[in-house]
Amino acid sequence: MTKDETTWYASWFNTPFYHILYKDRDYNEAENFMYNLTNYLNIPENGKILDLACGKGRHAVYLNKIGFDVTGVDLSANSIAHAKQFENETLKFNVHDMCKPYHEQFDAVFNLFTSFGYFENEEDNLNTIKAIKANLNETGFGVIDFLNTDYIIENLVEENTKTVEGIAFKQKRRIENGYIVKDISFTAEGQDFEFQERVRALTLADFETLFEKAGVHLLDVFGDYKLNKYHKSTSKRLILIFK
């Protein structure tokens, strides 16, 4: 069986309901984050960026709009099919498994919005960082934008219901065997659906261990999309800059 058939994220991310549930993500915040990040990294004009696990391409489209040559890749064929409508000479999208190196090198590789730590095989977390390293040119930077698990666990909302487009998504969260788990159930189009999200509860120390094994160097850590410094107990994000 392929990864598409056996993993929770391949099936859930390929459904339209995933995008409905998260349709209210803050696009202005995302754009400001990309603007702040590219300025901080001083990526050259027309520089090449790989958006790793790009989803439907919202970050990639904006990065291209502000002058970068962007490639977006994702395991979800449905997401890539949607993103391809935005393609131009300096913006392209392809289906790709981020555990493996892509066939080009870039000035920056961005892995955004907690698109890491999903794998059943923990070796794939290390393989992904090794792949990012392989995709960086001599002056390139890697970026992983992850959740701050210390903050999430301390402030865990165990259960809530979120209604979007008339669909009531019941969400239950728990910590289980080192994972942050969210069970999602809802009824739509006369059918009952159940999905689960599982993200490894990786801490800064865990990433430092992975980076050491992958042979990359952690340069800076931020705690939010405004690039304020990371604080273990209060920051909502864990944004890692490395090369």
Image (cartoon, rainbow, N blue to C red):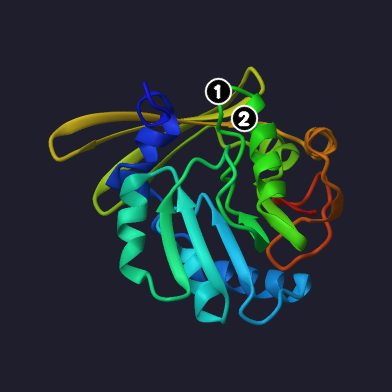
| Residue that appears at 55% across and 23% down | 120
Of badges 2 and 1, the one in the foreground is: 2
Instruction: Name the quadrant containing residue 193.
Output: top left
Residue tagged by mark 2? 124
Q: Marks 2/1: CA distance? A: 8 Å
Residue tagged by mark 1? 120
Instruction: Name the quadrant containing residue 224.
Output: bottom right
Label 2 element class: helix
* Position of the C terminus by quadrant: bottom right
Residue 95 position, x and y percent, is 41, 48
Does 235 appear above or below 127?
below
Does 137 appear above or below 209?
below
Residue 56 position, x and y percent, is 40, 57
Say whether residue 18 is left or right of residue 103.
left
Q: Residue furthest front?
A: 103
| Residue that appears at 24% across and 50% down | 166
